[in-house]
Image (cartoon, rainbow, N blue to C red):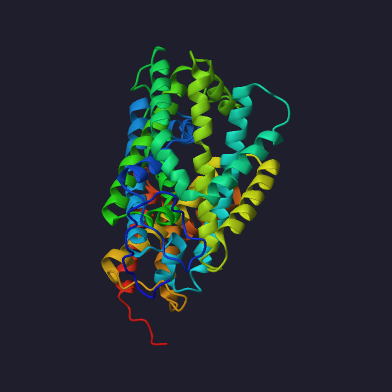
Amino acid sequence: MTATAERIPDVVDARGVEAPLTLEEPPPRVLGWLDQIALWFNLGVSLLGPVGAVYVLQPDGVHSMSFVAAALAVVVGTVVGTAMLAAAAVPGAQTGAPAMVLLRGLFGRRLSYLPTLINVIQLVGWAVFEIVVISQGAQQLLGWQGHLWPYVVVAGALTTLMSIYPLSVVRVLRRYALVVVALATAYLFVQLLRHPLPSLTHGGWNGFWTGTDFTVAVAVSFAPLASDYSRHARSGRSAFGAAMIGYSVAQIACYVLGLIALLTVVQASDANMQHDMFARFIAVPVGWLAFGALVARELDQSFADSYSTVVSLQNVVPRADRRLLAVLIGSLATVLALVFGIGSYSDFLLLLGSVLVPLTAVLLVDYFAGRRGAWNVSEDAPSRFWMVLPWLLGVAAYQLVNPGYVTWWADGWHEVAGWLHFTAQSWMSASLLSFVVAAVVTLPLSRRRIPAA
């Protein structure tokens, strides 16, 4: 890995080309516009999306916003979050470095291990979530209502296999999955819209920014892995544009589909809402086929989480063979999926967003407006401990506005707000406020001279 950011030559013939086995090998530039659009579109579509729409429609868990308000929250949150995600993909395309290795330039090599640890934890968590969702969806689709563990094992094995051949998976997504997923989603839209819709303006706007923050958190949760794939892009422009177009279109469609389902055929208050929503999708004419396509497509979510965990670990062990790491991580995620469910999903996302939004802000401001390309990603990258400050202040700003619903955590931040005499207003967005705070504090600090070694 070179000491500063530099362009790596494109690979003209992409057939059979795979990602490098270690961090010391240069990444091939084989992903064009359509490859990347297909990747991000498929990552933007998730079975968790329609289920997660309830956290937008009923952000406080009791009162519902109107469909218009909830749909606008989805659009605003998705566009804002995807813009952060797309911008985070550009440094990877320009330097050829994966996401956590890029943070060597921000914090220094040793300090980059802290966000790497956080990222590994959240990615393993996401892989577990996805494997469980895939297994539950497959079980409901096939009707074999015995033990769940065979589905988990199969989903985990497929996730691991895909992680060993990441660029081949992206090419498959471009050739086949993009069209199939788009048609399946459109078909479910048509079938749900055949049901009578209630008033689209019934309900209020209270909780609009909370719902927006949720969709921002979903989109920006991919920012710490964006460069793991954009490092194979042929240009920074294609990396940004493909992520912006592919992911935003898919997430908006996915969550609006969930909102329509909640207004027509699914009860938001149902304790087993996920099972009910899946059942409703399967129940439409030939719905099993459309739903089956979405279940199979969900594997690219677990694959992306697993593969990016592998690449993140290579920031710490750059000479480790990613194939061995893929087997270890895939096995770990499978075992955890056998043990844990997917409870506290919204709480996990909000806490995750509070950490990732300001970290993304610090990275983007320092990279684009601070040092402007003087980006050291070598193993000798010196520590820049002062860059942790804007990150922490951004996290604090997020928590003061929206500390989430984990009781002990939220109570602690309410006490801090009392000490500061701060009262969150209904118009405040935790995501936007934390991004602005982190960005403003980063700019002067980014130009601080690094002491000579």
Q: Residue at x 60, y 51 (%)?
A: 408
Where, quadrant-wise, is the N terminus in this rendering? Answer: bottom left
Q: Is residue 447 left or right of residue 197?
A: left
Report the front residue among 41 and 211: 41
Report the front residue among 136 and 115: 136
Q: Which image quadrant is residue 91 in?
A: bottom left
Q: Residue at x 50, y 41 (%)?
A: 300
Image x and y of residue 205, in percent: 36, 32
Where, quadrant-wise, is the C terminus in this rendering? Answer: bottom left
The reply to whether residue 308 is visible in this rendering is: yes
Image x and y of residue 110, in percent: 51, 74
Q: Residue at x 49, y 30 (%)?
A: 294
The reply to whether residue 404 is visible in this rendering is: no
Q: How many marks?
A: 0
Residue placed furthest toward the right: 147
Image x and y of residue 97, in percent: 41, 64
Image x and y of residue 115, in percent: 50, 63
Q: Residue 430, relative to residue 5: is it above or below? A: above
Residue placed furthest toward the bottom: 453
Q: Is residue 399 left or right of residue 363?
A: right
Q: Which image quadrant is residue 137 in?
A: top right
